[in-house]
Amino acid sequence: MIKRFLLLATLLLAVSGTAHANSWWDNYMPDNRNVRLTSTNLPIVWIDVDGNYIDREERITARMKIIHNGDGTLNWADTVAHPGQRIDYEGYVALRYRGSSSYLYSDKKPYSFRPLDKPLEDGGVKKKVNILEIGKDNNWALLAPYADKSMMRDLLAFEVSRPWMEYTPQGRFCELFLDGTYYGVYILTEVVSNGKHRLNLPDPGLSEDSITGGYIMEVNRVEDEVSYTSKFHPVSNTGIRYLNQYINFQFKSPDYEDLTQEQVDYITGRIDQMESALWNYRPTGSTAYRDYLDMENFVDYQIAMELGHNVDGYRLSGKFFKRRDSEDARFKMVVWDNNLSYGNADYYDGWRTDTWIYKNNNTLNSANDPQLIPFWWYKLNTDPEYTAALKHRWAQYRRNNLREDRIMATVDSLAHVLTVNGAERRNSQAWPRWGQYVWPNYYIADNFDDEVDYLKQWLSDRIAWMDEQLDYDPTACLRGDVDGDGNVNIADVTALIDYLLSGDAASINTANADCDEDGNINIADVTALIDQLMGS
């Protein structure tokens, strides 16, 4: 008990530079404990721990109740005055704090929770629950946007990558009460894990094809978890190895203690094979590394990291997975942890719009940061076919959800959700931080609108720089891409027919819809597009 108290006291001293005066014994309550919530467009989450301390390592039993009457419908905090509301979930959960820097340097703490069939003290076991229509599972998180004063950077990164990546987590804004006290706006989200509605990987077996999948790993710090150290060192901007620096991988699923030694040997050996093939790649040599990683997926992941200029990108929370060889033998990445992206970080040049973050090892190493970016990204970007694929994919993104009007509309939509019924205002009452530096803010906004304006301007500058670097020509016409998604397929035929029936030009790219290039859009263009798809 004394050892634990000293450890907690040390932790408190480590974070004493933050503005918040409350501490672990009151479960890090907000500055203003008297914020009133009458109604909200966001789901309302109540957690009751009966005054017990929430731990970072060991889960405790809590009761959770979520009210969500549906999109476009208000949720009321007074359930007596407003009976009959839709209870999305009510029951026990196993609760703990989660996160690394998001826990240590944030007054507002994030949580991990697992629904239970009964209290832990009575032998409760986790159960799968469909929460907020995200899909049934037993592993959930409540992210606590704090340093990200826009509160939308994680969800924005998800929305940017979702149309392209095989799997991207889903999350929803909500408002949280803990033991009756209003704690502000959180993001209830699935975590990158196995499950039917997530990565849906089979448990690895012991032989032949079954031992080859599925596994979830993560590039991250060693911390206290069992990890595996890469046989290859990170490199500088010019490919020089940092021989005193190492890259570590954590076992995420199955848990290390649930793996046999044969399974550990297999997946670490597979990482070795992938890294060896990539390390030995030369522009005029073998491209065998593509047998071990999904090149298009890695391109998509790089775009997500680079668009946000994520200062933690590639090197922290770098989640990747592998299916069984019979399904897909290649490693794939998953987007996660972007709260310090999009110009939010004042360190390691995270705020800049005019550099590649995958080339950030020189800056990281000069600052004596022990967690550098794996050499993978340097080597991939020496492959002309990879960089050509990167440029092609960027052009597809830019004609689709990264068209500037569309990404700004996404930002505006997220901002509207937070402001239309006062959620952002209540959060700022609980945690008054406008006009104050919160680690690691580069820009110190005076209010929410100011923060959103900064985010949009930063995005505009970043996109313009990436356009220049990746040779994107916004005036280029992709003939046949009627719906503007960057691809030419049967959906474009449908969009063209819908346009001809409705006359709604706002729903199509009119330049691309003139498939026969005669200056008109009519039924002849449908025929030309079908011929194009059939290869005529």
Image (tube, grey):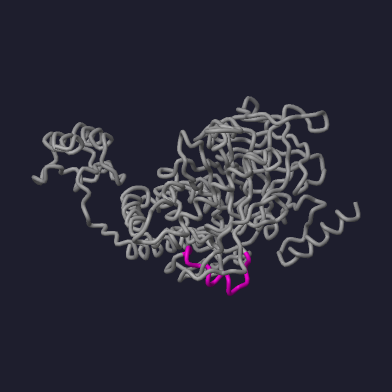
Horizontal side, residue 259 vs residue 59: left or right: left
Horizontal side, residue 329 vs residue 94: left or right: left
Foreground: 403 or 116? 116
Q: Residue at x 71, y 48 (%)?
A: 97
In this rendering, the count of numbered labels is 0
Q: Residue furthest right?
A: 2
Q: Position of residue 424 (x, y in %)?
A: 58, 51
Residue 331 seen anywhere in this rendered image of the structure: yes
Give the quadrant of the C terminus. Answer: top left
Q: Residue at x 65, y 38 (%)?
A: 45
Q: Residue furthest bottom?
A: 366
Q: Position of residue 37 (x, y in %)?
A: 65, 43
Residue 404 seen anywhere in this rendered image of the structure: no
Q: Residue at x 28, y 45 (%)?
A: 484
For the record, the magenta segment spans 357-370
Does 491 lie within the magenta span? no
